[in-house]
Amino acid sequence: MSDSSPPPSSPPKPAAPRAVRIRAADVPGTAPAATMRLNKRMAELGLCSRREADDWIARGWVRVNGQPAVMGQPVAANARIEVAREAGQQQSLQVTILINKPVGYVSGQAEDGHEPAVALIQPGNRWAECNSRMRWGFEQLRGLAPAGRLDIDSIGLLVLTQDGRVARQLIGENSEIEKEYLVRVSYGAETVNVQAAFPRERLALLRHGLSLDGQRLLPAQVDWQNPEQLRFVLREGKKRQIRRMCEQVGLFVTGLKRVRIGQVVLGNLPIGQWRYLGAHERF
């Protein structure tokens, strides 16, 4: 008689373990890795501005650790961030323009009937000695914004840029770029030999010791350029800072001209004219 009983079955295989994401905070004795928003991290790395980063992410031009990036994504400091070639090509077309702003023009948006400095960025106002090979096009006005202020009654070097990296370098919260100004002043009735009449201890206050808007000002370089004119070098840019500093020590500003930002100088650029930032120039 044959044995018709079924063969013994193999023991069941154990179920595969389910993947579980373990956060550092879940493990005793560890701390969560510090993260920040992807657009902030990209700006911090000098890749682009935050706004530009958001645009690139939306276009699918950014990958984090090999995966497509998501808007608002938090990333660790050691995350591998890759940017598509298209982003670099777009960035290479962005322009930075230097203009010698005249009196009567505002740095940003038009206000109180005064035109913005960007209105002067026209082919006819391009400096004849601008040696950039960049060709003018009206698309260069799109997103062109001032990287810093210059008062309506001041003249001199103003930077307008489409490049978020330049803007961050010049006006970012951690910027320490020097700005140099020549400032013509009077002291009471004295308008000719102001240097001789102005007390030395007040000059020391201009260098360090004043406050504006309830905040102590950073140390500044302030020296006489000639008997009627001071040279200021600042690393900050509060609204109408130099004029307000001078008022606190009894000086009245009769003329103010910005002549340098970082390593870029105004030079012989005529008032009301502009040029491109050269490929070799760095702030």
Image (cartoon, grey):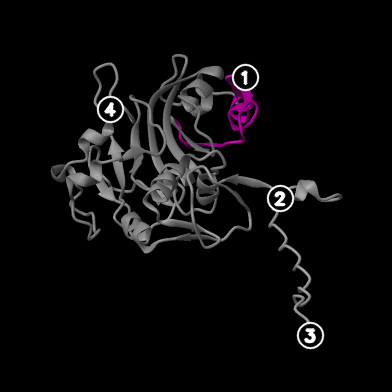
What residue sits 79% from the left and 71% below the top?
11
Query: Distance of mark 3 from mark 2, alpha carbons?
Result: 71 Å
Labels 1 & 3 near each other (Cβ < 8 A): no
Judging by the rendered image, the residue that carries numbered circle 4 is: 105
What residue sits 28% from the left and 48% below the top?
268
Q: Which residues are magenta?
A: 200-227
Residue 242 against residue 157 in the figure, above or below: above
Q: Nearer the viewer, mark 3 or mark 2?
A: 3
Q: Nearer the viewer, mark 2 or mark 4?
A: 2
Relative image position of residue 104 (x, y in whole percent)? 27, 24
Most foreground residue, 9 or 147: 9
Task: Say which quarter of the image contains residue 235.
Answer: top right
What is the secondary structure assignment of the residue under circle 1? loop
Query: Distance of mark 1 from mark 3, alpha carbons?
Result: 106 Å
Query: Distance of mark 2 from mark 4, alpha carbons?
Result: 48 Å
What is the secondary structure assignment of the residue under circle 3? loop
Task: Rate crowding at label 2 as few (under 14), some (14 to 19) or many (20 or more) other CA atoms within 10 Å.
Answer: few
Relative image position of residue 114 (x, y in whole percent)? 25, 22
Horizontal side of 130 relative to 124 (left or right) equals right
Horizontal side of 40 relative to 1 (left or right) equals left
Q: Earlier in the sequence, mark 4 or mark 1?
A: 4
Relative image position of residue 277 (x, y in whole percent)? 32, 52
Q: Earlier in the sequence, mark 3 or mark 2?
A: 3
Position of the N terminus by quadrant:
bottom right
The mark found on residue 214 in the picture is 1
What residue sits 77% from the left and 46% below the top?
25
Looking at the picture, which amino acid does disc 4 mark? Tyr
Judging by the rendered image, the residue that carries numbered circle 2 is: 33
